[in-house]
Amino acid sequence: MNYRESYDIFGCCGILFNHESPRRGLEFVTRKVTDGAAKIKLGLAKELRLGNLESKRDWGFAGDYVKAMWAMLQQDEPDDYVVSSGETHSIRELVELAFGYLDLDYKKYVVQDPKFYRPAEVHLLLGNPAKAKKKLGWEPEVTFEGLVKMMVESDLELLRKKHGIT
Amino acid sequence: MKSLITGIDGFVGSHLTSLLLGRGDEVGGTFHYDPDLKLLGDLAGRVKTYNLDVRDREQVASVLEQFRPDRIFHLAAIAFVPVSFENPHLVFEVNLFGTINLCDCLLETGLKAKTLFVSTAEVYGSVNPEDLPLTEEDRPAPTNPYAVSKLAAEMMSAQYVRHHGMEIVRVRPFNHTGPGQSPKFVCSDFAKQIAEIEAGAREPVMRVGNLESRRDLSDVRDIVRAYVMALDKCEGNGEVYNLGSERSYLIRDVLDMLLNMSDAKIKVERDPEKMRPSDTPDIYGDCAKFRAATGWRPERTFRETLADTLDYWRRSVKGD
């Protein structure tokens, strides 16, 4: 913003809420869950250890978010935008969906481990993408359910290939 | 009480040193720009000093290990806004990473020193006139890299309170002036020019920038007293407090007050070099939160502040 105001640089701030895809690193909770569920489904793991299941996040599909980024740069004037799904879901909902998609009951496999509790956890994240929708005409195409399904399928496929499971 | 001042060689550091020594504190200080410690004058012999570049983490740890402070006043910073446009990287290294180094080294050494982080009211940036006076609840919207670096450091220091239980008080002082301030800042600049004109060292023409802006101006001695009260009375829970005079002075009036203190006949001329690109027209703060927490109130009148600043330059021009 300083460079924009002082030097007239065409710079936009995209304030992106969590955006996920099958390419997410395994240390992030979405991928940890979809990878963990797929491993259990294939008999490669017995449990999945997680932190606080009640934290809520605003998750979207990274592919949708890069479209918003591109759209910001097509405008006549630079501006700042919040990019988010506008929905919030708990880790528990994420787990339920991922395991449910594989016909597994998460309660049998998920262990809450205080080791993964964060000292100063942000309990709720929820963005309002109204400005991006209005000014950029941006609309996310992948729903939360669609995102989880996409990631579970991808992890299942990756693990099958890696371990030669057909 | 062992008090460490980072940036003891600076304008504010010298006034804080004088106050702390007067209270009987054992004072240590780090310097970087002025190894001669000119602003400290005779006080230099009564403090332990360390040559320190806050960007060097090992040096920071070593100073802490040697002096083992009970309290730290973290003043070391690059405070001149135009430098931050020329070299934002440097300003972040010193103002943000210097602060991170200090906090990390405190954790590493296990010293439980209560620390004052000195931010700036510059973090508020562009303000709507209807938001005046500014309270701590007003949203920072910095308009220069210096203010961004201070806001980042302010937020980082709160992280050390949140995650590591460190004892830190954060303050956002508005502009302050007084004897010893660099002539890069407006009041000191005016006073220095007048002193030089009086001594015949300059033609009787003052060169000035924008006279129409209004600033919340305090006396540096009131401000350093507030710094000490902040550590005496505020809990080190990362709260942030405004510090200022709670009113704004038109720079033109500041100039007139100073000119009235001189018998010299002086012409005033606009100098485009001294105009800042994004000058905020008016800014002043509400310090009710700090007053309630500490009972602090300014003691000096602004006239006194300007008179002392002018006298400082008169002595300085004479070479005293």
Image (tube, coloured by chain):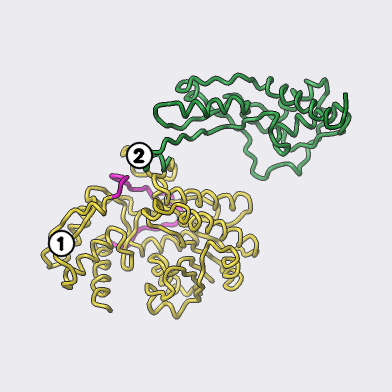
Q: What residue type is labelled 2?
A: Asp
Q: How crowded is mark 1: few (under 14 residues within 10 Å), some or many (20 or more)?
A: some
The correct choice, above or below, for B70 with respect to B254 in the image is below
B190 within the magenta span: no
Relative placement, left or right, of A8 versus B212 is right
Relative placement, left or right, of B300 versus A96 is left
Tell me where residue A41 appears, x and y as whole percent: 85, 26
Quadrant in which the C terminus of chain B appears = bottom left
Q: Point out the stretch of residues depicted in magenta.
A: B276-301
Relative placement, left or right, of A35 versus A77 is right
Identify the residue shown where x is 30% and y is 49%. Answer: B276
Distance from the alpha carbon under mark 2 to that under mark 1: 37 Å
Tell me where residue B153 appears, x and y as whole percent: 51, 52
The chain holding disc 1 is B
Q: Can residue B291 be seen in this view?
A: no
Tell me where residue A46 appears, x and y as whole percent: 87, 33
How would you classify the magenta stretch by its main secondary structure? Answer: loop
Residue A150 sits in quarter: top right
Instruction: Give the residue pinned by disc 2.
Output: B131
Instruction: Give the residue pinned by disc 1.
Output: B205
The correct choice, above or below, for A97 with respect to A116 in the image is above
Tell me where residue B38 appears, x and y as whole percent: 38, 74
Identify the residue shown where x is 52% and y is 21%. Answer: A138
Look at chain A in the picture and name its colour.
Answer: green
Look at chain B in the picture and name its colour.
Answer: yellow
Nearer to us in this view, A40 or B171: A40
Disc 2 or disc 1, which is closer to the eye? 1
Q: What residue type is labelled 1?
A: Val
The chain holding disc 2 is B
